[in-house]
Image: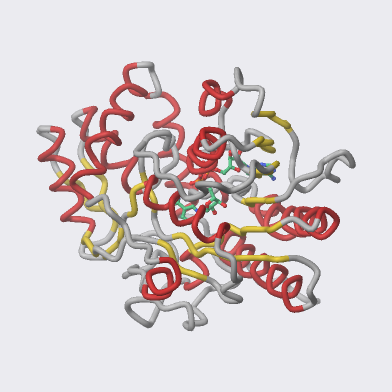
């Protein structure tokens, strides 16, 4: 990934990355270690993997702490910055154990905020565009409060992340920690899991396997796609900012594509003969998603640099390598989990006698 120096002249720090063995967390750990910092990666390896941080384990500036963020944190931890990325991010994974997902967001974030308070560490929370739910406002600005179903199958994540934001801003208002919140929109790149059920991994893996490309609904719903290196640059800038923005900041790529456009781009780049196969829309699937990144641009001059067509190249190469290594079985498993989650009924009312 293209390396940029945001901390020229800055002190070497001790940094905790919760969820550091995941897709985004591992890129962040890599960047921080490369900048000379001492990084502790805390991860329960639920959706992350040792492979993602394998290259770092030889560095004496990198420590892996395998633990669940919901459990009490070790007393000896002393850090100056905390990035909280710990939480499964794809629907089949966060719906596999929805109560644990909610607890990760609430109890886990509270544990890390407590650590930030004890260490007087700066804290960055990886929130999500899912806090906007199925939005009625386009593009979504940070001032929009969202349109979320609090009882549906996605609520464990959407409402969990909203509750985590509440905790973050209460810690900030009470002067207990210097907390910053970023709202991340769809981000993709190498190290995504082929079985994570997200739109890019699904379409790319199906195209590479020559299978029909699954599109839910008409395919005219839109998404925006940010390349991982652009996002990581944003997280570093947000953490490094001298002044706390005191409000959440959207990070994502405002380029808006229909799922049909994405599918045709994937077919073109892979040269796959796959056909398109239409399926019913999942429960609470948002129709449009596009960030307003005015605040990130105004505060940090941040904007994404990698266009979708450019970022898909290395991403497709990554998936092709993973498939060659035999990830097929896990993809099939994920597809079944995704289908089960999609068909999950609304809760049944309790009968009173
Ligand atoms: N990738 C995206 O498009 C996107 C979009 C919005 C928000 N985010 C947020 O960014 C963060 C990272 O996302 P990602 O795409 O890298 O997902 P990921 O699933 O690859 O990474 C999450 C990491 O957290 C770890 N984890 C999960 N629950 C944990 C727990 N209870 N204790 C300790 N570790 C735990 C997982 O093992 C994994 O390594 C998440 O918080 C996610 O909500 C990501």
Q: How many numbered marks does the figure carry?
A: 0
Image-based side of 70 in relation to 265, left or right: right
Q: Position of residue 330 (x, y in %)?
A: 45, 28
Image-based side of 286 in relation to 46, left or right: left
Report the residue at 65% width, 52% height from top: 101
Q: Position of residue 52 (x, y in %)?
A: 51, 28
How was the colour assigned to the protein in this rendering? secondary structure
* Quadrant in the picture for residue 56: top right
Question: Where 280 sits versus 309, above or below?
Answer: below
Report the residue at 65% width, 36% height from top: 39
Q: Position of residue 88 (x, y in %)?
A: 57, 47
Report the residue at 49% width, 43% height from top: 24
Question: In this view of the protein, which residue sits in the foreground, 131 or 216?
Answer: 131
Q: Position of residue 68 (x, y in %)?
A: 74, 40
Question: Where 176 sits versus 88, above or below?
Answer: below
Image-based side of 283 in relation to 315, left or right: right
* Quadrant in the picture for residue 271: top left
Question: In this view of the protein, which residue sits in the foreground, 151 or 251?
Answer: 251
Report the residue at 37% width, 66% height from top: 301
Quadrant location of the N terminus in the rendered image: top left
In the displayed orientation, state which residue is furthest to the right.
75
Quadrant location of the C terminus in the rendered image: bottom right
């Amino acid at each position: 990934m293209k390396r940029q120096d945001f901390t020229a002249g800055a002190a070497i720090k001790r940094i905790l990355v919760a969820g550091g063995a995941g897709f985004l967390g591992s890129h962040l750990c890599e960047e921080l270690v490369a900048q000379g910092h001492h990084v502790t990666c805390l991860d329960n390896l639920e959706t992350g993997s040792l492979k993602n941080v394998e290259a770092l384990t030889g560095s004496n500036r990198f420590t892996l702490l395998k633990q669940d963020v919901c459990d009490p944190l070790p007393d000896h931890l002393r850090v100056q910055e905390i990035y909280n990325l710990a939480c499964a991010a794809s629907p089949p994974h966060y719906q596999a154990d929805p109560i644990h997902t909610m607890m990760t967001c609430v109890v886990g974030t509270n544990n890390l905020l407590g650590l930030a308070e004890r260490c007087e560490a700066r804290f960055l929370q990886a929130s999500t565009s899912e806090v906007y739910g199925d939005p009625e406002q386009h593009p979504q600005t940070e001032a929009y409060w969202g349109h979320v179903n609090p009882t549906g199958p996605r609520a464990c994540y959407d409402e969990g992340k909203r509750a985590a934001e509440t905790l973050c801003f209460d810690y900030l208002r009470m002067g207990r920690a210097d907390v910053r919140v970023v709202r991340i929109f769809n981000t993709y790149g190498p190290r995504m899991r082929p079985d994570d059920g997200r739109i890019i991994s699904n379409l790319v893996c199906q195209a590479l396997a020559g299978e029909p490309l699954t599109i839910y609904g008409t395919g005219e719903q839109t998404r925006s796609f940010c390349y991982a290196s652009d996002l990581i640059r944003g997280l570093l800038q947000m953490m490094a900012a001298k002044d706390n923005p005191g409000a959440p900041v959207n990070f994502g790529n405002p380029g808006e594509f229909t799922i049909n456009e994405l599918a045709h781009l994937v077919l073109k780049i892979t040269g796959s003969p796959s056909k398109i196969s239409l399926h019913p829309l999942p429960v609470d699937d948002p129709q449009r998603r596009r960030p307003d990144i005015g605040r990130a641009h105004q505060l940090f001059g941040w904007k994404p640099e990698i266009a979708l067509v450019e970022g898909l190249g290395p991403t497709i190469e990554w998936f092709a390598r993973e498939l060659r290594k035999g990830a097929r079985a896990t993809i099939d498993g994920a597809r079944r989990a995704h289908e089960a989650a999609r068909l999950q009924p609304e809760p049944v009312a309790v009968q009173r006698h």
